[in-house]
């Protein structure tokens, strides 16, 4: 590979990197702000509330329910009695948990979706990683809610020590997601550099 080809390869790599960063930024803003907007659309009394969307297309409430129900199953499996509604879980002789928008993990889901869709990888691999990542975040969130219900039920005197559970959860989730993304990127970039080098250096026939 001569100097001109090296410069061309570097320039092409720089363009791909810039394109990835721009796509990541645009998609993240689109997903995260879109979810915030839809939260306003679906909450009665909010600025952009729309009764039709709130009644028929309320995926945010659907996600809440999908988190609360299995979390309550787990709490009950530990011997506690828990009752719940659309947004709250009350553990008898235990804590009262309010599941609001910030508890849904939509921020980290937005980042994951933006990163995976922006990264140049085959669509099959992209969709697989997206599904695995979102399911992982969902399961971790269920475990967090159930864990709070159980731990605060067993250790009532230590409830003040669980004040920063949102921050701890975000750190754990981001660590898991970054490890998964690292392994995924490594798998999707393995061998590409060698293939390109061979293609460039292949001699031409006289």
Image: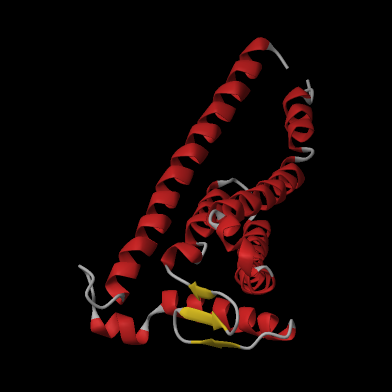
Residue depicted at 54% across the width and 33% down the height:
17
Return the residue nearer the eye: 190 or 74.
Answer: 74
Answer above or below: position of 96 versus 24: below
Residue depicted at 38% across the width and 79% down the height:
58
User: Which quarter of the image is occupied by the C terminus?
Assistant: top right
**Which percent across, then down, holds residue 35?**
39, 63
Return the residue nearer the eye: 174 or 166.
Answer: 166
Indicate the quadrant where residue 13 lies: top right
* Horizontal side, residue 167 vs residue 49: left or right: right
* Horizontal side, residue 186 vs residue 53: left or right: right
* Horizontal side, residue 133 vs residue 25: left or right: right
Answer above or below: position of 81 versus 204: below
**Which percent across, then down, holds residue 1?**
73, 17
In the rendered image, the residue lying farthest to the top is 3
* Horizontal side, residue 173 vs residue 60: left or right: right
Answer above or below: position of 92 versus 185: below
Return the residue nearer the eye: 9 or 180.
Answer: 180
Residue depicted at 59% across the width and 77% down the height:
94
**Which percent across, then down, holds residue 109?**
53, 59
Residue depicted at 66% across the width and 59% down the height:
129
């Amino acid at each position: 590979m001569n100097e001109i080809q090296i410069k061309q390869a570097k320039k092409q790599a720089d363009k791909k990197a810039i394109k990835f960063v721009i796509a990541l930024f645009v998609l993240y803003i689109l997903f995260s702000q879109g979810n915030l907007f839809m939260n306003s659309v679906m909450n009665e009394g909010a600025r952009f509330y729309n009764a039709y969307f709130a009644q028929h297309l309320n995926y945010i409430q659907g996600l809440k329910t999908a988190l609360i129900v299995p979390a309550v199953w787990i709490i009950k499996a530990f011997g506690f009695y828990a009752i719940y509604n659309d947004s709250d879980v009350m553990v008898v002789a235990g804590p009262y948990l309010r599941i609001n928008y910030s508890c849904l993990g939509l921020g980290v889901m937005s980042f994951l979706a933006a990163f995976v869709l922006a990264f140049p990888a085959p669509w099959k691999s992209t969709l697989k990683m997206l599904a695995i990542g979102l399911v992982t975040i969902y399961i971790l969130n269920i475990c967090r809610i159930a864990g709070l219900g159980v731990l605060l039920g067993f250790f009532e005197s230590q409830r003040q020590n669980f004040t920063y559970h949102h921050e701890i959860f975000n750190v754990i989730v981001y660590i898991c997601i970054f490890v998964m993304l690292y392994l995924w990127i490594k798998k999707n970039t393995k061998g590409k550099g060698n293939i390109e080098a061979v293609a460039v250096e292949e001699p031409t026939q006289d």
